[in-house]
Image (cartoon, helix red, strand yellow):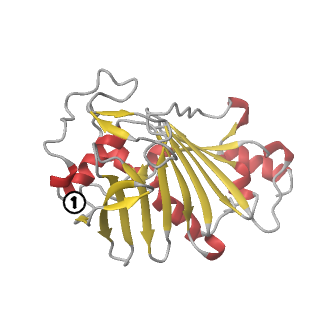
Amino acid sequence: MRLPRSVSTAAAVTAAAVLALGGLTACAGDDVDDATVNSKSGPSGAGGTGPAPGGVLPGQETANPAAPPPAKPPADMGGRELADRAVQLMAATSYRLTGQFGTGADAATLSIEVGKLRDVRQTVTRPDVKQELIRVGGVVYTNVESVIGATPGVTVPASLRGTYLKTDGQQLDPKLVDPFAGSFGADAGEVVKGQQTQMDGKGVWPLTIKSADGATTTMYVMAAGDPFPIKLTVTGADPVDLKVSDFGAEVGVAAPPAERIVDEATLQQRMAEAGG
């Protein structure tokens, strides 16, 4: 029996695209030694003062000196320079992403938590299914209910409820499992820097990339201090609207308990035993 899929192909692809945002974190690879966080709410949170120049992020007092401080302020940087700097900054800290993506039947809310060790927990919620994906090291765990639970005519056996399917995350394209990956990486094409504007009462620079399919991706980075991203939007067939918050917060991402983990063979066996 082939494993049924709980979400439509379009929704799954969109989720992968959203996860690709964080490759700003995966592609950079260097630590940053010139940023600090004044508020756990992050620059996009209510009352948050946001990142400021000088110092280091909590717990990174011995940051890798290979990531140099910016040679000039954001106002004097071009689009590519700002995007590269944002990549470096996000590679050095933990954070959370929340928002929406997709339209119509494929619309969903999204929450992504990224730890300082680049482990990730993603939760996608749609009317018919809730998917939780946890990546720890090179392993991905997906809640079984989202793998089979929303498929018409298929019931999740009691023996599989609350379990997670274990897969080899190393076989996946890194751009599809790291939030920020690829969207503004070095190979993403021209980054256009727009006019400074206001967002949530803070000055930001919009950085825009247009893809071959006509979609426009815009990352809004702080205009004062280091250019931390505080929002990312995608317009086109699969729209995305995400806010970034909780820079430097303690984000604990751990694998599920061993007794709640199954591999594909076990999943197939239990489905067969239940008559699925």
- Residue 242: x and y in percent read 49, 58
Under circle 1, the secondary element is helix
- Residue 257: x and y in percent read 68, 30
Query: Image quarter for residue 4?
Result: bottom right
Inspect the image, locate mark 1, and give the three-letter code of the amino acid beneath it. Gly
In this rendering, would 222 be left or right of 96?
A: left
Total marks in image: 1
- Residue 128: x and y in percent read 74, 64
**Is residue 182 shown to the viewer in this render?**
no
- Residue 205: x and y in percent read 30, 59
In this rendering, would 4 be left or right of 230?
A: right
Residue at image position (32%, 41%) is: 89
Query: Image quarter for residue 167?
Result: top right
Q: Quadrant of the C terminus?
A: bottom right
Which sits in the foreground, 206 or 23?
206
Q: Residue furthest top?
A: 62
In this rendering, would 169 be left or right of 53?
A: right
Residue at image position (27%, 54%) is: 83
Relative to 198, residue 84 above or below: above
Q: Quadrant of the N terminus?
A: bottom right
Which sits in the foreground, 134 or 81?
81
* Crowd rating for badge 1 (residues with CA inside 10 Å; few <14, some 14–19, many 20+): many
Residue at image position (37%, 77%) is: 213
Q: Which residue is mark 1?
A: 79
Residue at image position (43%, 45%) is: 43
Relative to 143, residue 237 above or below: below
**Is residue 86 shown to the viewer in this render?**
yes
